[in-house]
Image (cartoon, rainbow, N blue to C red):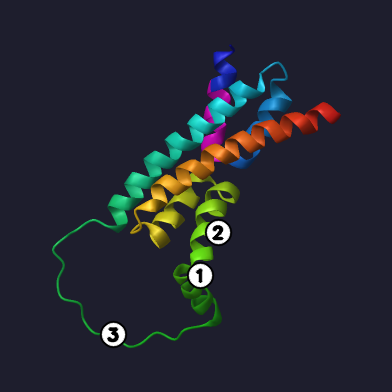
Amino acid sequence: MNWLAFLYVFLLSHVKFLFAATIALATYPKFSVDEIFISSALGAISCFNIFYFISHRFYFKKVNKKPKVVRNKKNFKKRNRMIIKMKQSKIGFILVCTLAPLFLSIPIGTVIVVKFFGHKKITYLYVSIVLIIMAFLLAYLNESIFQLF
């Protein structure tokens, strides 16, 4: 086992999870698919845990707040309405929890997931399972694509 390659894929999956398996196969061709899967899954889960608990504490910290002053109503634009509809629908939960950490980086996607759906208890488990499944799919699909070339 090449520990430097393992650490490289582990840290790369922190930054850009979607391309970690592809870059690992391109730079270390002797690195096995199982090792890529394990290192990218561990990297994604560890980064997700760090940013989930930090952002959850930031957004849902209980502090004695002063009474709020009544403000003027905000104008709702089309974008704001779309965001509210997405937050309230079940498909919005699934899409945001699945696609935000995948297409954005893990830290930014995690903060978005916690901001929108951090109050739901299933969020942590759902995103953890999705990250492991995606690490598996990305590692093995990239291997099969690299076999064609």
Residue closest to the eye, 74 or 95? 95
Q: Are marks 3 and 2 in contact (CB under 8 Å)?
A: no
Amino acid beneath label 1 = Met
Provide the residue span drawn in magenta.
7-16
Find disc 3 in the rendering and name its residue: 71
In the picture, measured across the screen, residue 52 lies left or right of residue 109, that is left
Q: Residue 86 has which mark?
A: 1
First along the sequence among labels 1 and 3: 3
Amino acid beneath label 2 = Leu
Q: Residue at x 39, y 40 (%)?
A: 49
Q: Is residue 8 magenta?
A: yes
Q: Quadrant of the C terminus?
A: top right
Residue closest to the eye, 43 or 32? 32
Find disc 2 in the rendering and name its residue: 95
Q: Residue at x 68, y 31 (%)?
A: 140
Above or below, 26 against 77 in this view is: above
Q: CA distance from mark 1 to mark 3?
A: 25 Å
